[in-house]
Image (cartoon, rainbow, N blue to C red):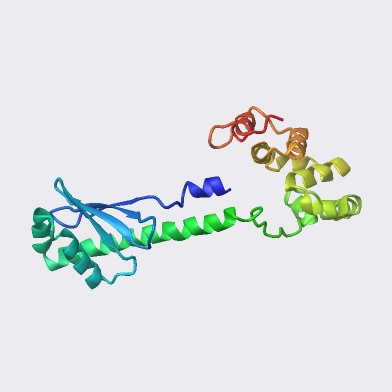
Amino acid sequence: ALALAEQFCRQSQVAGLDTCTEVGFDWVMTPTRFSNRINLELGQGGHATLVQVEPALSPYQLDATIHAGVKGHKALAQIYALLPSDQRAGLLSELRESIDQVQANRIAADRLQALRAQPELPSPPQPRLDIARALQRFEVPEQQARATEQHLIATYGDALSRMHGSQVIAAAHARSPHLGLYGAPWQTWLCEHATTGSLNGVEACLGMQAEPNVPDTNGETPLHLAARHGHPG
């Protein structure tokens, strides 16, 4: 879960392009390693300079910081100084958005780091499956569904809370067969169990006639998913 999350929120660079101005500034922002500042590489027409900005600057303060930062680069300083007020306001607004993105990346990375320091990811409690209602959704008559639910509770007890929905419904079918249960999303569940390496779940789905050679919506078969996620069993 952490590896997947880090693909989407890490302390990486944020690129921007101001298309509102005729001169067309572009920029790249990256968080500094040893402070809360942000490195802003601002460029236009082959010219570029590096400016360090604070993340909480107001538009006026950001404008002043850029003025001071481009001061040593004659071409950029002149271009920036000649920007009409409305175009400059648009540019500053776009820069503000990029700064906010960098800060959001920082916060997300810090949260991921805190999670990584824990022994394991926190698991939110799962609500108990309403077995009778689930069976009725697959056209099992109410009386049969409730009787089956009582049998499963008596047979499996607390173990039901650790069973996947596919395993519960497969157990219900074994106790009281019903054709409607074959309409349950066994193919989706088979791919899910192959991804997580749950052999019991895989067996339950195959026992309910899920087809192991049918790909999921991404074109991957259960075998592809199991292999890619390191589940040789």
Label count reads: 0
Instruction: Find the residue positioned furthest to the top.
Output: 213
Q: Residue at x 80, y 55 (%)?
A: 132
Q: Residue at x 76, y 43 (%)?
A: 181
Where is residue 169? Give x, y as percent: 78, 45
Q: Residue at x 57, y 32 (%)?
A: 220
Where is residue 213? Give x, y as percent: 64, 27
Position of residue 90 in the picture relative to residue 127 (left or right): left
Q: Is residue 140 above or below residue 223?
A: below
Residue 103: quarter of image? bottom left
Where is residue 76? Give x, y as percent: 12, 55
Position of residue 101 in the picture relative to residue 171 (left or right): left
Quadrant containing the C terminus in the rendered view: top right
Q: Is residue 48 above or below residue 205?
A: below
Which is nearer the eye, 226 or 175?
Answer: 226
Position of residue 26 in the picture relative to residue 13 (left or right): left
Residue 198: quarter of image? top right
Instruction: Find the residue positioned furthest to the front.
Output: 34
Which is nearer the eye, 193 or 215?
Answer: 193
Where is residue 68? Give x, y as percent: 17, 64
